[in-house]
Image (spheres, grey):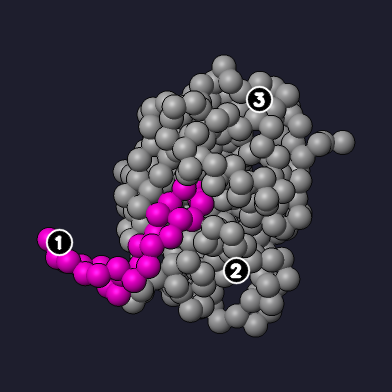
Amino acid sequence: MSEFDVVGVGLNATDTLLRVPHFPAYGGKVPFHGEQYSVGGQVASAIVTCAKLGLRSKYIGTVGDDIRGELQLDSLRNSGVNIDHVQQRKGCGNQSAYIVIDEATGERTVFWSRPDCLALSPEEITPEQITCAKLLHIDGHDTAAVGRAAQIARENGIPVTVDIDTLYAGFDQILPYVDYLIASSEFPARWTGIEDPFQALEAIQKKHGVRVAAMTLGAHGALALENGRFVYSPAFVVNCVDTTGAGDVFHGAFCYSVLQQMPMAEALGFANAMAALNCTAVGARGAIGTDGIATLEEAKKLLARGERRIQADVARRANTN
């Protein structure tokens, strides 16, 4: 029996959130209404989501030895995530971001920095760190290291999910080990040079052999290609306060769905519900000292009665595929 349900290898960050009444024009100036720390990061937040949903969860990554790194460690630990293989780098600041939240729309603009001293090398990934889990979740940042983790997972029959939103050199070497690719809305076109999202996902699946090629669509939900058929899941309508971390929570919820063996339409719907609920509070995982990620029961309630925002052209094309 595996010691953990899911292990994640990838980024974490500690954010400083600034809330403004509206985002100013270039060169403009507006007052901000609040400033607060909030922990986040692509893989870290996904793994915390898995823990919140009841999965035995482990995170592998690096943190700085500054206050931001300590806040991240405290959050992971208090969320019930195993951090035995989190490395705290001495004399190194944690990855950080300044996130400006437009209170009129809930959208955010991110300015981020990650010191080179946080880099994770492939030699620091051992088989035992990966084979202890039923599923591996990665991003693409420390490409060689996450590639090593994905290779170990594939060699041991462990499914791999990836959260990718940026073009990383060498990422094509990781894709042969990936089972579930869920990209940002911009990635498929950037990666393939094909603007049509349906054709871009088909090209990715054909070239790299991923079991599922999918993309999130922000306020319009998610689209996935599995077994030659497209599945479209509309987003939920909520009172959006802050979109920070919604995609990360989506990925954590999708990992949960894979382990629960949900059909694709159900998996995307559940992930959409968790992501939507995360938009109703400020911060990727809420403010420091709070628990901002929704519960399984809250997601089920939204699934049962929530209003959906359907992107008609995507729904039509998916249904005729």
Which residue is tagged 1?
A: 26
Residue 282 in the magenta stretch? The answer is no
Mark 1 residue crowding within 10 angstroms, few (<14) / some (14–19) / many (20+)? few
Residue 90, image x, y percentages: 49, 26
Residue 185, image x, y percentages: 41, 55
Looking at the image, residue 310 sits to the left or right of residue 264; the answer is left
Secondary element type, mark 1: loop
Residue depicted at x 54% and y 47% = 71
Q: Earlier in the sequence, mark 3 or mark 2?
A: 3
In front: mark 1 or mark 2? Answer: 1
Secondary element type, mark 2: helix
Mark 3 residue crowding within 10 angstroms, few (<14) / some (14–19) / many (20+)? many
Up/down of 180 relative to 312, above or below: above
Up/down of 159 relative to 260, above or below: above
Secondary element type, mark 3: helix
Measured in 3D between alpha carbons, the distance from the residue under mark 3 to the one under mark 2, in whole angstroms, is: 32 Å
Range covered by the magenta-colored residues: 14-41
Placement of the N terminus among the 4 image quadrants = top right
Measured in 3D between alpha carbons, the distance from the residue under mark 3 to the one under mark 1, in whole angstroms, is: 47 Å
Which residue is tagged 3?
A: 152
Residue depicted at x 14% and y 65% = 28
Looking at the image, residue 107 sits to the left or right of residue 228; the answer is left
Whether residue 123 is visible here, answered yes or no, is yes
Measured in 3D between alpha carbons, the distance from the residue under mark 1 to the one under mark 2, in whole angstroms, is: 34 Å
Residue 46, image x, y percentages: 59, 50
Q: Are marks 3 and 2 in contact (CB under 8 Å)?
A: no
Q: Earlier in the sequence, mark 3 or mark 1?
A: 1
In front: mark 3 or mark 1? Answer: 1
Where on the picture, by quarter, is residue 179?
top right
Going by the numbered disc 2, the residue's amino acid type is Ala
